[in-house]
Image (tube, helix red, strand yellow):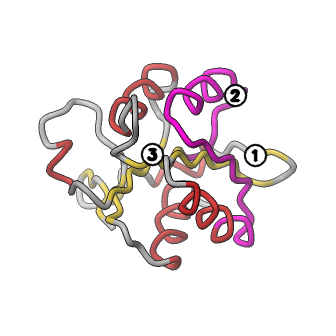
Amino acid sequence: MACIEVEGVFSLAMAKNHHVETHGKPVVFVVDDESMLLDLADVILKPEGFEVRTFRDAETALAEYAAAKPPPCVVITDYAMGGMNGLELIRQCRILHPDQRTIMVSGTVDEDIYDHVEIKPDCFLSKPYNAEQFVATVRTLTGY
């Protein structure tokens, strides 16, 4: 797990104030063009107390994100998808909500992909990731 650090501590410590809940559960958006990975995220996160909303493309996710009142606690996105990529989705989400917490996952690129962009994900996970690592990263960002 790679997370951006500020002054030696997670810049995400303030995430506890960023809870967005539906029916008492923090909402997580998961975006990936591989339906099996969306199902896997759902199976991993729901038993941990999260409400999971899955999207097969970034454009649909962004439309739902723009309409969400309030926005989700965290947006988890694959990097390489048809159409809009994960970095562009993160950029668009942050235009709407600058404090949005994000995780980028990828099996095709590493963290170097966002070295030279202004808006970066809060954390990066390489595929394949294990369930414990995935849950720990989401918990770190949401404070849940």
Q: Amino acid at mark 1?
A: Glu
Name the residue tied to disc 2.
68
Of helix, strand and loop, which one carries label 1? strand
| Residue displayed at 68% across by 69% down | 43
Q: Quadrant of residue 90?
A: top left
State the image coordinates of residue 97 (x, y, percent, origin top left). 51, 26
State the image coordinates of residue 55 (x, y, percent, origin top left). 60, 42
The first of marks 1 and 3 along the sequence is: 1
Q: Quadrant of the C terminus?
A: bottom right
Callouts 2 and 1 close, C-beta under 8 Å: no
As drawn, is 37 to the left or to the right of 54? Answer: left
As drawn, is 101 to the left or to the right of 123? Answer: right
Q: Amino acid at mark 3?
A: Thr
Name the residue tied to disc 1.
21
Against 103, residue 72 (above or below) is above
| Residue displayed at 61% across by 22% down | 66
| Residue displayed at 45% across by 45% down | 102
Q: Amino acid at mark 2?
A: Ala
Q: Quadrant of the N terminus?
A: bottom left
